[in-house]
Image: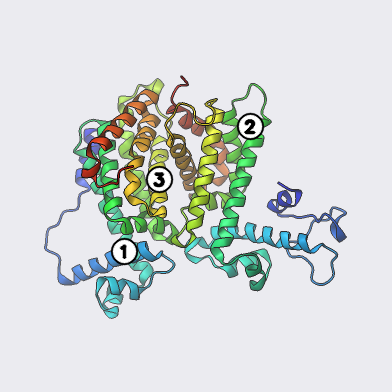
Amino acid sequence: MTRLELELLDGEVAAADGPFSSGEPLPRRLPRGRHGIPPNLVLEHQRLRLIAAMAEALAEHGYAGVTTTHVGELAGVSSSTFYKHFGNLWDCLLAAYVYTADRLCEQIEAAVEGREPEADPLSAGIDAALAFLAARPELGQLLGAPPPLEASAVVAARRILISKLASMLRRARGQGEVGDRPTGLDERMIDATLAFLHSRIRAGDAARLPELGPELAAILDRARRPVA
Amino acid sequence: MRPEARAAAREALPVETTAPTPDATVREGEMEGALQVVGELGYRSASVRAVLEYSGGHRRQFYEHFESLEDCFAQAYETWIERLGVELLQAAASTPGWQSAVQAGLVGLFRFVAERPRIARSLFVEAQVAGGTAMAKREEALERLAAALDSVRNEIADDEAPPQSAGVFVIGGIEACVCEILAEGSEKRIWDSLPELMHLAVGSYLGPEAAEEAFEEAKSLLERDRVQLGGEAK
């Protein structure tokens, strides 16, 4: 993840060059006129704002009510700017889904890599995922809710995320890429995990997600096939 | 399934005391139409006109029955999710043994999905898109099914008790699997996930050995009865 991306997710962005290079946070809406920020950075900044706004707008209005206007307003861009970046609402949703899924996987991988040698990798990964979703519950809703008919491409993106997380689960258990388990079992466990966390977020319990770590680790560990 | 869970399922069965009036039949048709249309077009694209094209009623009559399409969908959802929940609990209740009862419930669910994919899509996917009052009913239905699964706890020793959230976890996993298959439009292939979901359900409560047994049993069922169950061969 780039510095720009990290800071955008924290709600503040600092430009690499130009008037904000001293470390001043970049406002959510860039200044009009001559500001000295390179055009490619402006475009990337707009795109990332739209991606972040998509998850927020979805959490606020739900799939039934969310529109490109909601997303554009939250991102601080005009309708025409929205359509410069995305063909329609569902393209933006797909970009937001992929972006968020990648961030989640990165957080888990970093936590597993950086854990203490004696620490359990499964617990480290679960704790990282729970912290990520507790801090940004709208991202948990984005990843957990089934997409509407119009957003069929998100179904494929979801399958990729499930597959990546299942692979991480197998590695955390020391089972290698596939292990001796029939394919699909770990994917179902991950499906169930995302649904479980989504239901907690929807019930307004996002802040308490980190407390679920031991419970989730116990469930994910219970049905595993012993390594031959 | 335990006797008390079986009794609860029986009590929940709707009792028809009188024949439906023509008006009730029209209303029922409009509700089914709403589910069919939402399942085909998606919640955001559905309209009263499309519902009436399906059900064959009149706009005036529709608005005598419902305040809006949203109201019609919410009422249809409540009616059908209740029926489906009762049907699944009944299928489980009439099957002896917890593991076999779970499998019977899943087979009932898969039959419904394979035979009525549009309505299933409305109930499982688009209802979550719609949000609103349907969500409270959904939570209620999921909790009831999770409680039925949890009935096996009484047969498990305290030191081997499954995690507290096992029921909600398993039901959520089953629902997510159904949503994925419906979203892909490959509902006939839902049968392929029977062994995996049996592994998930049984393993979450009884551990790996029982999960393996349930997995193999479900595979054998599919090999034996695939055509009868209505799914496509893998």
Quarter occupied by residue A38:
bottom right
Picture coordinates of residue A210, whole percent (x, y): 57, 38
Residue situated furthest front in the rendering: B233
Q: Can you name the residue that lies furthest to the bottom here? A: B60
| Residue found at x 41% / y 42% | B173
Tell me which label, 1 or 3, sits earlier in the chain: 1
For the residue marked with disc 1, what is the amino acid?
A: Gln
Q: Where in the figure is residue A35, as x and y percent of width and height?
A: 84, 67
Between residue A201 and residue A124, name the one nearer to us. Answer: A124
How far apart in space, not on screen, are marks 2 and 1 (Cα)? Answer: 46 Å
| Residue highlighted by disc 2 | A112
Answer with the quarter of the image where residue B164 lies.
Answer: top left
Crowding at mark 2 (Cα within 10 Å: few <14, some 14-19, many 20+): many
- Residue B190 image position (x, y, % from top left): 34, 46
- Is A16 positioned to the left or the right of B75 in the image? right
Q: Amino acid at mark 2?
A: Val
Crowdedness of circle 3 by 10 Å Cα count: few (<14), some, many (20+)? Answer: many
The crowding category of the residue bearing disc 1, from other C-alpha atoms within 10 Å (few below 14, some 14 to 19, many at least 20), is: many
Badge 3 and badge 2 both on one subunit:
no
Q: Is residue B1 visible?
A: no
A81 left or right of B142? right
The percent coordinates of residue B168 (x first, y second) are 40, 40
Residue at image point 29% right, 51% down: B114
What chain does badge 3 belong to?
A: B
Residue position marked by numbered label 1 in the rendering = B36
Report which residue position mark 3 lands on: B177
Secondary structure state at the residue bearing disc 2: helix
Numbered disc 3: secondary structure:
helix
Image quarter where the C terminus of chain B lies is top left
Three-letter code, disc 3:
Cys
